[in-house]
Amino acid sequence: MSDTVIKELLQSHRRFFATHQTKSISFRMDNLRKLKSAILRYEKEICRALWQDLHKSSEEAYLTEISIVLAEINYHLKNLRRWAKPKRVSMPMKLFPSTGKIHYEPLGVALIISPWNYPFQLVINPLVGAISAGCCAMLKPAPYASHIAQVVEKMITETFPTEYISVIQGGREVNEMVLKERFDLIFFTGSPMLGKVVMKAASEHLTPVILELGGKSPCIVDKDADLTIASRRIMWGKTINAGQTCVAPDYLFVHASVKDELMEKMKAALLEMFGNNPQESDFYPRIINEKAMKRLTRLMEKGRIIHGGKVDLDDKYIEPTFIDNLQLDDPVMQEEIFGPILPVFTFENLDEPIHYINSHEKPLAFYFFGKNKTAMEAVLKTTSGGGCINDTLLHLSNHNLPFGGVGNSGMGHYHGYYSFLAFTHQRAIVSSRNWFDMKVKYVPFKGFDRLKKFL
């Protein structure tokens, strides 16, 4: 992919957007339906590619990628006409007899850069918002997940005119070329480190950005938690996609009085899900590549492994692993793990984990298992992009909730109505009447003392 090709694609997008076709609600809905039909048509190819790239079972592929996108499309089809309708707002007496409305207009041409961990969902889900808002879009799939990247390109090219929605492929050099161009919005999902690169590039053109990043999402298990439920749900959240999930529980703080029991129950939950040897399970994914394997293996060098620890570099397999006897400044606590490794710490007083969380970067997710009253105390004393009480991951699957980070874990939101807003400019328009003209507002402001009462 050359710089010239990228420039030509971008210009074709701008010309197509200038025709105003994408602003039509019927056009947007027709193309949402086309996208849905294409996904259903390509479902088997999508599942096959996700197996090749990440060893995802078809069940996990549907649960965590395909179904989320299909539900998003259905939600937009159901609500788009209402969302896009200009919204009348109340006007203060001083502006009588004018009326005010918010008009929802598309930002223009959007660049969507997606990661490799959910390589279908995280490129197509933002696209739903772009189509719904009336934008054109250039998609940049992740090169590490090469099989699904090719399927996405094939599906999109077959379904939409290139001047409306295009796909570009390539590695870092293509990212550098495309980020030099001016877009009307850049939607990026990835690491905080790369998010800074994207934001810096966008600043050259004052391009707005939505950054869906990550971080070390804490999980707290209190002494009065239901340990059977907690163990199962923590292990589910940690082993989906082999822990390569931006909202996976990154580390665990468990009350000292229930630590041993929780560890045994988490081992039992793993046994129930994957059997004696997860490597032989059709439902246990793999690490994306050798580079990631070596990084994760390095993170396992400190502390005491109390479960798991098996590594097969050739198979890109890491067994679900618990590590305790760690120091809070050990390497595994200095970066987002993004793998099936769970550092375990104990606490006696809830203020201990809360202090640790608040003394570090704001995480993308926060999980608490225990009584609701204590959970809300922990929620109110910390901050995160989102989170769950007595569960993990589920907050991102509710289309009525905004999904996004805060601080180092990202900026901006999407999903459902928030996806529509993400690619939309909310334009304020005041319409004034000619039959009344308040002359006191003009120089030399005669009768201004009376006007002050209304200001």
Image (cartoon, grey):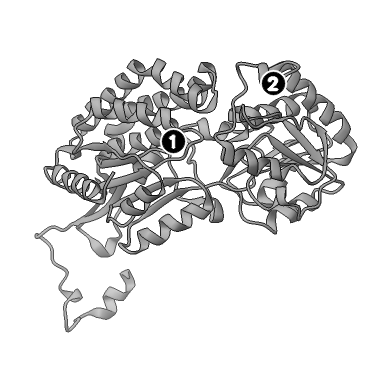
Q: Which residue is mark 2?
A: 278
Q: Which residue is mark 1?
A: 122
Residue 396: where, in percent of width, then height? 52, 35
Per the image, label 2 sits on a secondary structure element best described as helix
The answer to whether 265 appears left or right of 187 in the picture is right
Per the image, label 1 sits on a secondary structure element best described as helix
The quadrant in which residue 356 appears is bottom right
- Viewport quadrant of the N terminus: top left
Q: Amino acid at mark 2?
A: Pro
Q: Residue at x 58, y 41 (%)?
A: 291
Q: Amino acid at mark 1?
A: Leu
253 or 159: nearer the viewer: 159
The quadrant in which residue 67 appears is top left
The answer to whether 136 appears left or right of 120 in the picture is left
Q: Residue furthest right?
A: 257
Tell me which label, 1 or 2, sits earlier in the chain.
1
* Label 2 crowd (10 A; few <14 / some 14-19 / many >=20): some
Residue 263: where, in percent of width, then height? 82, 30
